[in-house]
Image (spheres, rainbow, N blue to C red):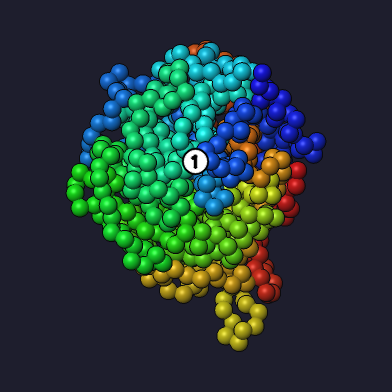
């Protein structure tokens, strides 16, 4: 008999790990843990398990099933249908394969009104010590975790206290390595899956839950057997504000644009890439071809991709250490920038589309401004590679009036050092070092950075990493060791923070405003939710990091941010 996953997790817990961590606004408490059967790691296709820890997590909010929905066959999209709820994707990527994505992976972590509550039908969400079991009826709404380990895709009930999955899907010839969920797919095919072999599938999550078997059912297959590109899929994403358009990034630096409504088995070839170091776009000759276009992004692996909420911009980071930002509709490279050292592994957008976060092998978190097209702050606090970054768009500063003035951003990052770091950053008043003509110590001035930086970077320019003395430094407000193993990614929801390690263990940390809610008790409708759908604004005053803020900054060889109030990093 297989060892219980609960026992497996408990045996791996370090005595030094706490079940809570402190933040300026209160305690985050460990609510649930999710994992896979221990036996799952023993199966792989031709490679050792250590080479196949391409772990990704997707959280999917499954809505009520429309009466007319047919989940078996994708239908042609309507050109006028562009209504889509915002979704969140936080990709981390130890060389492009470990990541965390949320509801389709498109850069924003807010959901539409009424959809933020994590509710599900828990009566059938049971498992046994012999492995995961499928449920009989999943026609209702619910919240699920989709994750992969070795050659199996697992589905767990987010609200259930059970650690084991309720469904497992086995792949015979390759391993699933990335996936993305589209909550508003009108044809029912809402789950996108990329494989190590380069194959891509779209399926209905609801249909997989209803089927008792261990194979994909009703799947649409693209790039079959790697016929177009046989390098590993590193990232997949639905394009926001479209119906059925998705992109697939590969380890060879190419990204392909697909239409779900078109046949996935068309015979198509693209011309050879003339210069692997330059960005280029090639289109299919036939309107029936799928994929419709190939973007050559970089030399080496594309490690992470992220769309802005409106789908207008696409950000990528790669093995070559560059962030690249594209105008997706115009197929144009806008700007890019280099890491301080090594590859960039993860990237994500702020919900307003003004800023980008990146992390990578230089152990730093970098904040990029779309307006300035440059790094405007960098964070130091990790002791190893940064594998996941995210904006917490559910958090708000205690004195926020909702007008957008004096905006404070809450950032999160996780790394190979097993730590979760939280950062508070205000960008309305920024202190930028002015270049000293004699090369001496820089001086500082508060106000808009556009008054101090050079002119806006021309389109298509890839910038080298700026001197650290020329960019404000950010320090974390919280640093907490949350797992035993190196971390792969993190996700912010309305009620909690999800962290995941590279071994496939997920922890759900409930927010202070929801910590007293008993998630195991049902409401009048028989549904279980993690906290309430709204976040309490009644928090004690906290310290937030300012870049400038009319403070006194001393001259020196590096720039550091000032604080509204005196505070220090909380190491818990």
**Residue at position x 34%, y 26% in the image:** 218
Relative image position of residue 254 (x, y in whole percent): 39, 55
Q: Is residue 84 left or right of residue 44?
A: left
**Residue at position x 43%, y 31% in the image:** 113
Residue 231 seen: yes
Relative image position of residue 339 (x, y in whole percent): 55, 64
Q: Is residue 481 left or right of residue 228?
A: right
Between 83 and 183, the one lying in front of the other is 183
**Residue at position x 51%, y 59% in the image:** 319
Instruction: Locate residue 297: give its quadrant.
Output: bottom left
128 is higher (above) or lower (below) than 356:
above
Relative image position of residue 571 (x, y in whole percent): 75, 47
Q: Secondary structure at mark 1?
A: strand
Quarter holding the N terminus? top right
Between 167 and 348, the one lying in front of the other is 167
129 is higher (above) or lower (below) than 499:
above
Which residue is the site of mark 1?
177
Instruction: Locate residue 138: give its quadrant.
Output: top left
Q: Is residue 567 left or right of residue 143?
A: right
6 is higher (above) or lower (below) than 48:
above
Q: Residues within 10 Å of mark 1 (few under 14, many from 20)?
A: many
Between 442 and 258, the one lying in front of the other is 258
């Amino acid at each position: 008999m297989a060892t219980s996953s609960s026992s497996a997790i408990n045996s791996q817990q370090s005595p030094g790990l706490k079940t809570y961590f402190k933040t300026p606004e209160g305690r985050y408490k460990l609510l649930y843990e999710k994992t896979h059967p221990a036996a799952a790691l023993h199966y792989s296709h031709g490679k050792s398990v250590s080479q196949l820890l391409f772990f990704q997590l997707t959280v999917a909010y499954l809505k009520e099933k429309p009466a007319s929905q047919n989940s078996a066959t994708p239908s042609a999209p309507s050109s006028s249908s562009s209504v889509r709820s915002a979704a969140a994707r936080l990709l981390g990527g130890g060389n492009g394969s470990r990541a965390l994505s949320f509801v389709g992976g498109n850069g924003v972590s807010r959901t539409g009104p009424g959809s933020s509550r994590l509710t599900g039908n828990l009566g059938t969400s049971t498992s046994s010590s012999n492995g995961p079991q499928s449920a009989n009826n999943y026609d209702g709404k619910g919240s699920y975790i989709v994750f992969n380990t070795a050659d199996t895709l697992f589905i767990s009930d987010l609200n259930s206290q059970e650690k084991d999955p309720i469904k497992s899907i086995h792949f015979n010839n390759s391993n699933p390595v990335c996936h993305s969920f589209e909550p508003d797919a009108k044809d029912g095919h809402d789950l996108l899956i990329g494989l190590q072999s380069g194959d891509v599938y779209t399926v209905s999550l609801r249909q997989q839950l209803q089927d008792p078997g261990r194979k994909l059912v009703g799947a649409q297959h693209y790039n079959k057997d790697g016929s177009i590109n046989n390098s590993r899929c590193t990232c997949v994403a639905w394009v926001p504000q479209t119906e059925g358009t998705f992109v697939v990034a590969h380890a060879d630096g190419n990204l392909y644009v697909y239409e779900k409504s078109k046949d996935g088995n068309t015979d198509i070839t693209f011309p050879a890439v003339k210069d692997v170091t330059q960005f280029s776009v090639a289109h299919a000759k036939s309107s029936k071809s799928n994929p419709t276009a190939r973007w050559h992004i970089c030399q080496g692996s594309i490690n992470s991709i992220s769309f802005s909420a409106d789908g207008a911009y696409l950000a990528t980071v790669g093995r070559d250490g560059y962030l690249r930002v594209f105008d997706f509709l115009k197929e144009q490279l806008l700007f890019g920038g280099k890491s301080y050292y090594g590859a960039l592994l993860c990237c994500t957008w702020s919900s307003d589309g003004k800023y980008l976060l990146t992390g990578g092998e230089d152990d730093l978190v970098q904040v990029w401004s779309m307006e300035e097209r440059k790094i405007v702050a960098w964070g130091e606090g990790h002791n190893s590679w940064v594998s996941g970054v995210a904006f917490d768009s559910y958090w708000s500063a205690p004195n926020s009036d909702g007008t957008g003035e004096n905006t404070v951003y809450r950032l999160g990052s996780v790394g190979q050092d097993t730590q979760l770091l939280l950062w508070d950053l205000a960008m309305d008043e920024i202190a930028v070092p002015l270049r000293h003509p004699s090369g001496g110590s820089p001086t500082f001035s508060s106000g808009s950075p556009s008054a101090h930086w050079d002119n806006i970077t021309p389109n298509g320019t890839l910038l080298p990493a700026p001197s650290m003395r020329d960019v404000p430094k950010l320090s974390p407000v919280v640093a907490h060791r949350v797992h035993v193993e190196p971390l792969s990614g993190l996700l912010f929801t309305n009620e909690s923070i999800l962290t995941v390690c590279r071994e496939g263990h997920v922890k759900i940390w409930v927010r202070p405003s929801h910590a007293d809610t008993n998630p195991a008790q049902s409401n009048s409708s028989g549904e279980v939710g993690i906290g309430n759908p709204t976040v309490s604004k009644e928090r004690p005053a906290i310290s937030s990091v300012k870049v400038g803020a009319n403070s006194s900054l001393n001259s020196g060889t590096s720039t550091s941010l000032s604080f509204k109030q005196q505070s220090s990093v909380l190491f818990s």
